[in-house]
Image (cartoon, grey):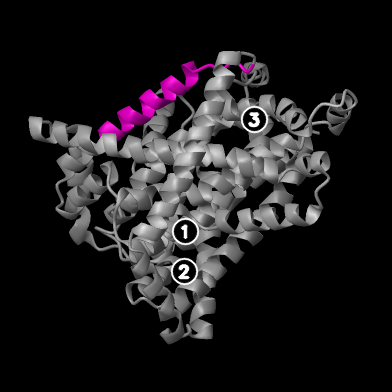
Amino acid sequence: MNKLKLNYTSLSFLPILVCIPLGYQLINNIHFGGFKLFQEFLISAFNPKIDNEIIITVIKRLNETILIGFFSWLVSIIFGAIFGIFSSNIFYKIFNIPNFFYHIIRFFLTIIRSIHEVVWGIILIQIYGINFSIGIIAICIPYIAVNSKVFAEQLETIDYKSFESINQINAPKFSSLLTLLWNPIINTFKNFGLYRLECSIRSTVILGLFGIGGIGTSIFLSFQTLNFRELWTYLWSLAILIILSGLIFKRTKFRTTNKVQSIFFIAIIFITILFSFSYFLYFIFNNNFENFNSVSSLFKSSSYLGLFYFLKLILETIILSLISTGIAISLPPLIIGIFNNNTSKISIKIIAFLLRLIPTPVILLTLLTFNNPSLSLAALTLGLHNAGITSKLLFTNLDSQDRRNYIAMKSLGISKKTSWLLGLFSQQAKSYLSYCAYRSDIIIRETAIVGVIGSVGLGWQLQESLSSFAWQEVTIVLIAYSSIAIVGELINGKIKNSLT
């Protein structure tokens, strides 16, 4: 058993080998002219700009961010639960519906889930222009699919015999369905749904960098003018928003047995569905519908991508995903293991929080001040951002773990680092790798963000094709992106199953 644990431990550190070729290319691409700018960026974190004008702007931008993020979250959670029911086996068993529809819905959700919200946002901006509606719709499209997958997985655990017991008393099928599904849906909402609100806010910030609005737009404008003090004012205000939302989530409690609360939930769901459908129809048929129609005609006149060039873009995207995943997996345990003292842990947690806080495009643009655009730089950016996320999980699990083995090994005279590795981390390695396999699904989709900014992979080609209205090329790129994400999800699913 110990040997098995050690193997999982070794696998957690093995991906760090990707840093050898990555580091070599980054060193070759360094130009020292931008180090002064980078230094100014770091120093400004301790001296943000604070005056009446910027405080008013911060409040306004945060309100926009909360509005887009909250409404996107609410719609995606409600429709995610609905599609989660439609994509679960128990729904088809209760109503005796052929499984053919089950497979169609799941396939459709897989397709739209495989494309990142930034990609949806860029496409919708190109068609409809910039407005709040684009941000909400762009976030809702993949989030509904992601949420439906989580809800469906929870509903699959329901024992069908429970329905048979209810059915014996001749209860209506719809009432039986609601009775069986209500508690699992609310429990999933409590355990997963509130976390998705924070994700929705972060997605709103990233879309804001592309002009949607909110605090992200102010961050990008400040960076463009190299006003780093103002930039950090927006970043710290975003940090406060995320911290406060996290505290609120922890204190929020829901009781599934409360009838008043159940009626309230049903009313909110019903109103949101009606409003969403009416809003969507108005948006499509009354908001630049002619523009959308004219865009569709451009498919006929666009040119195909060169085959070898297209294969090169696909290969770049895959390599970008693999290197980023390697950094995200191995960097946190390596750094925590080397600097294993209380002072260092605090510093690592602060740095990890900043890596999660600062939007990926801003990290990449900052690194571009002293390094040339390259696949390695894009991979480093994406890897560092996700390493901040995986390190948070690792710290949480390590802090809650039984430390008796660690203390016993230290008392035997074994070094602190070895005791941490074999007495603490080895027990977490399996679950940590399982989470990283899930995280790699997200990393594949996030390659679009760094691709657009960093001039690499399919993300860059998507931006180029959209700017020239080459919709046939856009379609090809989206199919390729979706295929890579789906294949990656299948592979990671096998890996996660082998680790459970």
Q: Is residue 495 above or below residue 18?
A: above
Q: Quadrant of the N terminus?
A: top right
> Is residue 454 in sight in this rendering?
no
The residue beneath circle 1 is 447
Dividing the picture into quarters, in which one does residue 299 lie? Answer: bottom left
State the SS at label 1: helix
Mark 1 or mark 3: whose residue is earlier in sequence: 3
The residue beneath circle 3 is 185
- Give the CA distance from mark 1 to mark 2: 8 Å
Give how far across and how far down residue 105 sits, in percent: 67, 54
Task: Say which amino acid is labelled 2.
Answer: Leu
The magenta segment is 236-256
Give how far across and how far down residue 423 sits, in percent: 65, 26
Report if the CB atoms under discs 1 and 3 are less than 8 Å apart.
no
Report if the CB atoms under discs 1 and 2 are less than 8 Å apart.
yes
- Give the CA distance from mark 1 to mark 3: 32 Å
